[in-house]
Amino acid sequence: MTIAVYPGSFDPVTLGHVDVIKRASRVFEEVRVCVMKNPKKHYLFSEKERLAFLTESTKQYSNVMVDAYQGLLTEYVRAKNARVVIKGLRSSGDFEYEKQMDFFNKRLAPEVETLYMAADNAYSVLSSSAIRELMTFGGSLDGLVPEVVLDAAAKRMGGKA
Amino acid sequence: MTIAVYPGSFDPVTLGHVDVIKRASRVFEEVRVCVMKNPKKHYLFSEKERLAFLTESTKQYSNVMVDAYQGLLTEYVRAKNARVVIKGLRSSGDFEYEKQMDFFNKRLAPEVETLYMAADNAYSVLSSSAIRELMTFGGSLDGLVPEVVLDAAAKRMGGKA
Amino acid sequence: MTIAVYPGSFDPVTLGHVDVIKRASRVFEEVRVCVMKNPKKHYLFSEKERLAFLTESTKQYSNVMVDAYQGLLTEYVRAKNARVVIKGLRSSGDFEYEKQMDFFNKRLAPEVETLYMAADNAYSVLSSSAIRELMTFGGSLDGLVPEVVLDAAAKRMGGKA
Amino acid sequence: MTIAVYPGSFDPVTLGHVDVIKRASRVFEEVRVCVMKNPKKHYLFSEKERLAFLTESTKQYSNVMVDAYQGLLTEYVRAKNARVVIKGLRSSGDFEYEKQMDFFNKRLAPEVETLYMAADNAYSVLSSSAIRELMTFGGSLDGLVPEVVLDAAAKRMGGKA
Amino acid sequence: MTIAVYPGSFDPVTLGHVDVIKRASRVFEEVRVCVMKNPKKHYLFSEKERLAFLTESTKQYSNVMVDAYQGLLTEYVRAKNARVVIKGLRSSGDFEYEKQMDFFNKRLAPEVETLYMAADNAYSVLSSSAIRELMTFGGSLDGLVPEVVLDAAAKRMGGKA
Amino acid sequence: MTIAVYPGSFDPVTLGHVDVIKRASRVFEEVRVCVMKNPKKHYLFSEKERLAFLTESTKQYSNVMVDAYQGLLTEYVRAKNARVVIKGLRSSGDFEYEKQMDFFNKRLAPEVETLYMAADNAYSVLSSSAIRELMTFGGSLDGLVPEVVLDAAAKRMGGKA
């Protein structure tokens, strides 16, 4: 059985992330979406919120599990007996960065393979940080994030007004 | 069971190709290396030779099969009940090209996923056409192609002299 | 009054083209879509068809005109008293190519400015040649071309069967 | 009447900026050069100086106005009844960044179009930050900035000695 | 003594080429500009003309020699006891191509080093093929080619009229 | 005699750096590897260590000298009567950055030429910062750094355990 790990901050999850998860869930027996916790980083949404958003927006995929982890990605992958890390690629700039990560991860865990999926064009410039910017300036998130995030964002933005 | 297809011309197979095949064979239950036949294209090595090179250089991977096909990649993938196409990415230029292919294949067969692997750095500028050029001008192929190709190339280059 | 020229082969026009035309029609007083005729090039659709597709799919924009021209783009621009050429940019690769064209056109007609629009993400890997490829292999054109082209393409593809 | 906005920090204005302004002034009825004020950012030249530099170096273009604004670009554009934002593109890296900005602005103000101009080759690696670096280390600014900036920079650099 | 070879088609030599030659002549004891002859290629200017253009436009650099060669670059480099090949880099696209050539040449002659110079910005989109295009369509070559080429091009273009 | 300067932080020196030094030492009469000191930057290895690593790992190249300098690169180059700066290029992204540096240095010292070498593929994603990351997380440095650095890193990493 091939288990794939899909790591990220997911602050918040976007429809681009959900698309990658859906496609990965058709290819691998189990997909573990893993919220990587970086104690030095400040997040807009709490870990609990981010996990809830992911759980809600992937509930229709029965072989997808949502998790959180603090530490090295390769350690998590090994602990779960996974062999594959999934990443979405939006642009050639993404790929240059990912080659560095791949090199790094291969050194720490040569048996782990990173596999890339081309992002759907509709999401090719979409990122969690773009969502946070749009929230700051009151831009519409419609068609960019799952409904559960739309609602949470509306509350946040409303609280501001 | 997830079957992955690794398509190409393999004229001839390089150690970069063999590295991708080896890594894919660890992730997927079955890997079908498929020599795509294009009747309009002229090849340096015959189909029979290319298949023999691939068979010989992947014989240590028991879940790898070698095949040839004339037609659309997506048709082959469906005929074999595969759901995954594997591609190696060497550079960001490769990715720009692959995004076009991905778009095209998704239109023909939305259920088929293309997954990319970053090429090992050692092979990041290696290609079959570079091998053919080196053969034309008598450059060393050492460390670039499997032994079986080294031998065949030596014979060809010898035959030229 | 600023007249803008939007040149291309439009073999056939895509929804990416139509999106650029629509956006340009809001900015410039007049937009002249110009089918550039290259006698050395072979086209899938006749000039008459290509003009008809463009006319039909831009009829809701009253300040858009459709035209055909054989010769240098800059000559056409001058003949129409236009000062602006509009181009869509899909990728950074597109931009590298366009910089060459810009340099060339500036030498022939320094008073003509080329202005670029970023393609809508939905169309960021879409091109007329991709459409022709999809037609060859029976892929769906849905959501990629205007209705009038969908119909014409269906007839062509049907005629093949 | 089409009004175009050309936004930036202009700390200080370079001849690359002036070239874009000149070209835009030939295409649009009115060009509003807008010094965007970011209270969190530290500038080398005061807002007053930056406005003076721009006013002086664009005085020969009668349809160019110089302005300053603190807030969202799209708000300024709307307030001025402009429909176009002008940006200069120097490299394909610039374009990747601008695609993100375009996506963001389109969400906030879908009716505003961003149009790009390829930078003149002579200015393709020139930026305000490069000018500030050169000032720090005593490099020549000749041919890179308008005369008024040359003079101001000389005074600053002299004051240092 | 370090001898550097600067290879190319030089059909015709541009001011971008002359700039690289001038800069190389300050660094290396001897610079051999080598017109590479490809019997399968069709040239606009004859070999004799191209050599004459190069000789005339580099005559002020006493350590620059002009040569022609048919065969492999690395063979020429070895025959001249040179250890260095000089190439101009205009864009990151150029570099991707040059990495392939570097790989190829290193296989044929590991002792030969290719050294790259960043093209002067003024010449960053200039190429011999752009010059030939401009000649075809009557564009000005002013500031793009040495005087001797300007004269020859004027004659050619005049002969056309 | 042509003296070339190879500048960097070398925190620590990698086998990619050593490869560039070795190749430069075959081309230039003297190669000065210069540890650039930036008082605002925090280093993992002390200046003394970094110099010792470089000295040890280049001792077989008799025309290579190791140095340290605080100040502008161009000042150091002039002080040593050098005319050439050597840089390794790993990717097209590197080149975009280097063009900016080249522009800057040319302004400060027009007589100094920067020459680029394509990094060996084996080292195309290797950097000092990748080494420091690997040390932090206990990844293997084998085949990435000279032996003297391997030993020092092992001590550091041991001291951590």
Image: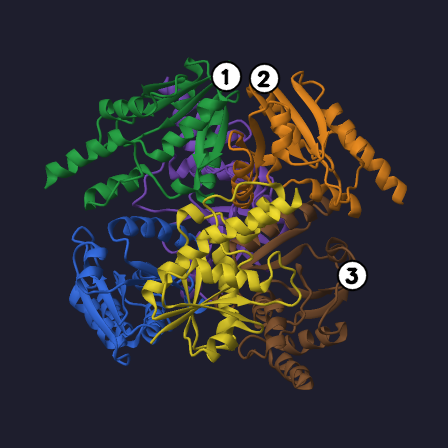
Chain colours: A green, B orange, C yellow, D blue, E brown, F purple
Pick the front one: E40 or B48: B48
Residue A26 visible (yes or no)? yes
**Which chain is indicated by disc 3?**
E
Determine the secondary structure under disc 1: loop
Determine if marks 2 and 3 fall on one subunit: no
Amino acid beneath label 3: Lys
Whole-percent x, y for residue E125 in the image: 52, 65
Amino acid beneath label 2: Glu
Which mark is on residue B84?
none
Q: CA distance from mark 3 to mark 1?
A: 53 Å
Q: Residues within 10 Å of mark 2 (few under 14, many from 20)?
A: some
**Which chain is indicated by disc 1?**
A
Report the residue marked by disc 2: B29
Whole-percent x, y for residue C133 in the image: 60, 46
Determine the secondary structure under disc 3: loop
Amino acid beneath label 1: Thr
Residue C137 sits above or below residue B52 on the image: below
Residue F31 visible (yes or no)? no
Q: CA distance from mark 1 to mark 2?
A: 9 Å
Determine the secondary structure under disc 2: loop
Report the residue marked by disc 1: A2
Pick the front one: D80 or C127: C127
Pick the front one: D43 or A35: A35
Whole-percent x, y for residue D148 in the image: 26, 75
Residue D99 sits above or below residue E16 on the image: above
Could you tell me which quadrant the C terminus of chain C lies in?
top right
Report the residue marked by disc 3: E40
Determine if marks 1 and 2 fall on one subunit: no
**Quarter assignment of residue C36:** bottom right
Pick the front one: C147 or F148: C147
Whole-percent x, y for residue C41 in the image: 65, 62
Q: Tell me whether circle 1 and circle 2 mark residues in contact (CB < 8 Å).
A: yes
